Amino acid sequence: MSQPVQRAATQSFIQKYINKETLKYVFTTHFWGPVSNFGIPIAAMYDLKKDPTLISGPMTGSLVIYSAVFMRYATAVTPKNYLLFGCHFVNEFAQLVQGYRFINYNYFKTEEEKIAIQEEYAKNKVEKTD
């Protein structure tokens, strides 16, 4: 790409995305609230690989309701906060998967299967510490 074309493309990008309104938005709670809140779904996705005996049913249920309420809130405020909606959408999905794992382990597994799962996770934990 020639220098003048590259310069024009850079100026166009700056004018479109790095302007007064964008910078004003970045310095609001409308932006930083959801950004800091993304720790919850990231932790939930990380926990999808952990031992199902560690999952708290009441906490998972609470987080499912919490994320559903805030997804609704994100679309009810003016202006709509799609970043907040996305954060809670990801968290809703991750918590529903955790809820499935909790119910499957606690209510549908036999005692033998539960023991096998516990041994598998204990073995993996020992291997990681070595």
Image (tube, rainbow, N blue to C red):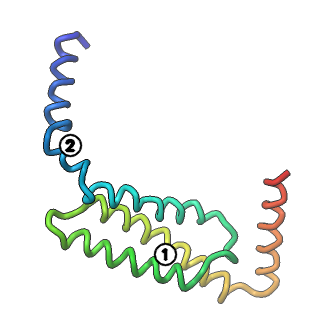
Q: Secondary structure at mark 2?
A: helix
Could you tell me residue 51's position as x and y percent?
Answer: 69, 70
On the rendered structure, is 55 left or right of 17? right
Residue flagged by tag 2: what amino acid is it? Answer: Leu
10 Å neighbourhood of mark 2: few (<14), some, or many (≥20)? few
Upstream in sequence: badge 2 or badge 1: 2
Q: How many marks?
A: 2
Foreground residue among 17 and 98: 17
Could you tell me residue 35's position as x and y percent?
Answer: 37, 55
Residue flagged by tag 1: what amino acid is it? Answer: Leu
* Label number found at residue 12: none
On the rendered structure, is 20 left or right of 64? left
On the rendered structure, is 119 left or right of 18? right
Could you tell me residue 59's position as x and y percent?
Answer: 53, 80
Could you tell me residue 102's position as x and y percent?
Answer: 61, 80
Which residue corresponds to mark 1?
A: 96
Residue 75 placement: quadrant: bottom left
Q: Secondary structure at mark 1?
A: helix
Which residue corresponds to mark 2?
A: 23
